[in-house]
Amino acid sequence: MSEVSISVKNLNVGYLSDYGLIKVLRDVSIDIPEGKITGIAGESGSGKSTLATTIMGFVNPPMFVQGGSIIVDGRYDILSMSKEELNKIRGKIISYVPQAAQNSLNPIRKVKETFMDILKAKGMDYYTNIDVVHRALEDVGLTDRQVLDMYPFQLSGGMKQRVVIAISLLLSPKIIIMDEPTTGLDVVVQYEILKLLKKIQKEKDLTLVIISHDIAMLFQISDYVAVMYGGQVVEYGKYHTLLEAAYHPYTYLLLSSVPTVRSRGKKLPRIPGDFEGFIRYPKGCVFSSRCPFATSTCKETPPETVVYDKFGFYKCSRYPEWRNEVKKAYE
């Protein structure tokens, strides 16, 4: 059993635009531990979904990989595999639940027809493998088999999400990447889906990678959390390490901006301004223009990556000095 399920090294990915090839992911390196839940947090536009689709090998123009490597399950070199080779491992080794997954179900096809299409694409007959379909639905709590004869519009938001998760589980993959799996669901249904994911992951010893801008949700479910900003992973580690004492100001500000019972009546930190953008990329630390603790050195010199654990690192040249300034700034 390998300790690392997904290994990303020095990954650079860009998009072709009217301004030329704009680099979005910049030297991203991260190891995802096997059999754990890893959350990837960050604002919209930070590169989370680009990282996920690249890991899956969904790289098509105007998207281009400009360097780096991705090794999945210790043996699959994603960026050097052909489309045919990638199709063989998708669903069986690694599955993907896309953003707005509920909308990925064809509205004019019954649920069973979607399962038929997936099995057919893998050279498998639906009726011969009906027990596999039933088991996947049971895994997500859909025990009423009438759901197979229903159209997506006849299902609630929570049921549609469960169907999509069942599809990702169908061929018993080792790894599942989920992009915003609770978006568009009400709070109660979100809680049910998170509880379901935790249960499935534990029972099947899956590696789950969950992408979300909802950092509070990620810290509720994840074993490890990677925080992305401006196309970089600025901090990564065990969730309780980041929760108790974040190394990077961006992580601290994201967590501190989440209202809690204890924060009632208190001044909450906020992140001023906006990301400068990928066209005019910052010269120094990617977060320096918005960081309340940044110095002139931060704006001019990129920080080194400080590794403190096998699955833990941060990029901030002012740690721990900036933490000493927190109380003064927000008291």
Image: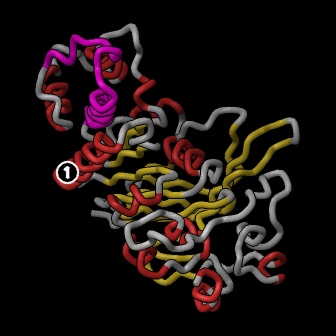
Q: Which residues are magenta?
A: 145-171
* Residue behind mark 1: 199
- Amino acid type at image mark 1: Lys
Q: Quadrant of residue 205?
A: bottom left
**Dot 1 surroundings within 10 Å: few (below 14), some, or many (20 or more)?**
some
Secondary element type, mark 1 = helix
Position of 278 with respect to 308 (left or right) is right
Q: Position of residue 105 (x, y in %)?
A: 39, 21
Q: Position of residue 73 (x, y in %)?
A: 38, 54
Placement of 221 over or under 321, stated as above or below: above
User: Which of the pair 266/109 is nearer the observer?
Assistant: 266
Q: Quadrant of residue 169?
A: top left
Residue at 38% x, 43% y is 94
**Colour approach in the figure:** secondary structure
Q: Position of residue 300 (x, y in %)?
A: 84, 77
Residue at 38% x, 39% y is 95
Res 208 seen here = yes
Residue at 46% x, 36% y is 98
Magenta run includes residue 210: no
Position of 19 with respect to 82 (left or right) is right
Magenta run includes residue 151: yes
Placement of 216 over or under 321, stated as above or below: above
Placement of 248 over or under 117, stated as above or below: below
For this orientation, the residue located farthest to the front is 265
User: Which of the pair 313/54 is nearer the observer?
Assistant: 313
Majority secondary structure of the magenta segment?
Answer: helix
User: Which of the pair 179/324 is nearer the observer?
Assistant: 324
